[in-house]
Image: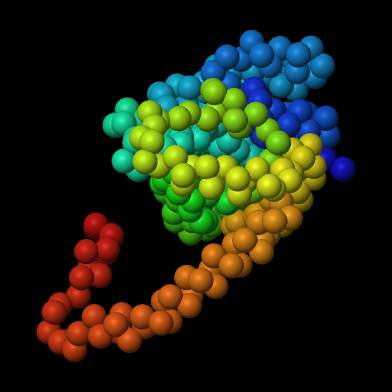
Amino acid sequence: MSDGKVWFITGSSRGFGRVWTEAALKRGDRVVATARNPAVLQPLVTLYGDKVLPLALDVTDRAAAFEAVAKGKDAFGRLDIVLNNAGYGQLGAVEELSEAEARAQIETNLFGALWVTQAALPILRAQQSGHVLAVSSIGGVGAFPTVGMYHASKWGLEGLMDALSQEVAAFGIKVTLIEPGGYATDFADPSSLRNASPLPIYNPIKEQLFATFAAESPGDPQATPEAIFKVVDAAAPPLRILLGATVVPMVRKIYEERLATWDKWASVSAAAQGTRTDLGRPAEALRPAP
């Protein structure tokens, strides 16, 4: 049974954003649904009336993010869930990426979530409640060749939201990173997945990566809302939640390999500490200003 939550969702027009927007409305919640082109959300207005507020939003525009969040709060009186979903994938070996491609990836996937979250935090702090979610990826935990810039944006998002969770817990605000594996969304659509100009030397690596992922069965996006509801309805939601049957063993393997490497080089790490005791206290720089 829904408790009538108010959602603010970015990237509501398609993919996970559309699935989760529709599912939240279907269970009786209200949604501030944002998209670059809110006209595509009109069918939801026809079905759900004033329970949905469609708004135009390019998350790379910080002022627009603050304006949209304020409109959502004004319309529904509060915000319970802020779901940073807007984003896209940038393919290309590190050598292939242009400056514009690299900057655009970070502007959308990382800064977009930052701007929306900054806009929402004063509202959530005043309420002494709320839940900030951000869509990361298995690509926010591990890395694959020729997806480096996408990984950079998602690893950055992971660090940002992890730090945020520790900053706002005292205000009653919860934070969760959603880490999906491969799903049959429209992620491969040109508007969701962009390719850098290729250098043929990297083609064998790309072909091997393609063959690896082509052999896997993608998840069904329509199977995900129940998992999201369990997270947002939980009294103590997780900081991170993996989506998909294959990702838990994948992440376990990633961390086992990292731990094995760190353990193998532990003596080198320890020796790098040094033995001097007269070096001052660098932590003093972290002391809050009076």
- The spot of residue 178 in percent (x, y) is 61, 48
Residue 184: horizontal and vertical position, in percent?
Answer: 71, 36
Q: Nearer the viewer, residue 265 or 167?
A: 265
Residue under the image location 54 percent in, 23 percent down: 190
Q: Is residue 94 visible?
A: yes
Residue 71 placement: quadrant: top right
- In terms of depth relative to the viewer, which is nearer, 186 or 274? 186
Q: Is residue 225 above or below residue 283?
A: above
Q: Quadrant of the N terminus?
A: top right
Quarter of the image for residue 27 reads top right
Q: Residue 191: percent from the left, percent from the top?
A: 54, 23
Residue reaching furthest left? 278
Identify the residue at horizontal 65%, vertical 56% (top origin). 247
User: Which x, y percent locates residue 203?
Assistant: 44, 40
By what rule are the colours in the image chosen?
rainbow
Is residue 21 found left or right of 289 in the rendered image? right
Residue ID at (66%, 19%):
53
Q: From the viewer's perspective, is 145 left or right of 56?
A: left
Check the image and report above or below for 280 versus 221.
Answer: below
| Camera sees residue 238 | no
Q: Is residue 224 left or right of residue 192?
A: right
Which quarter of the image is occupied by the C terminus?
Answer: bottom left
Name the residue rendered at 46%, 44% in the picture.
204
* Relative to 221, residue 213 above or below: below
The number of discs equals 0
- In the rendered view, tell whether residue 289 sits above or below residue 178: below
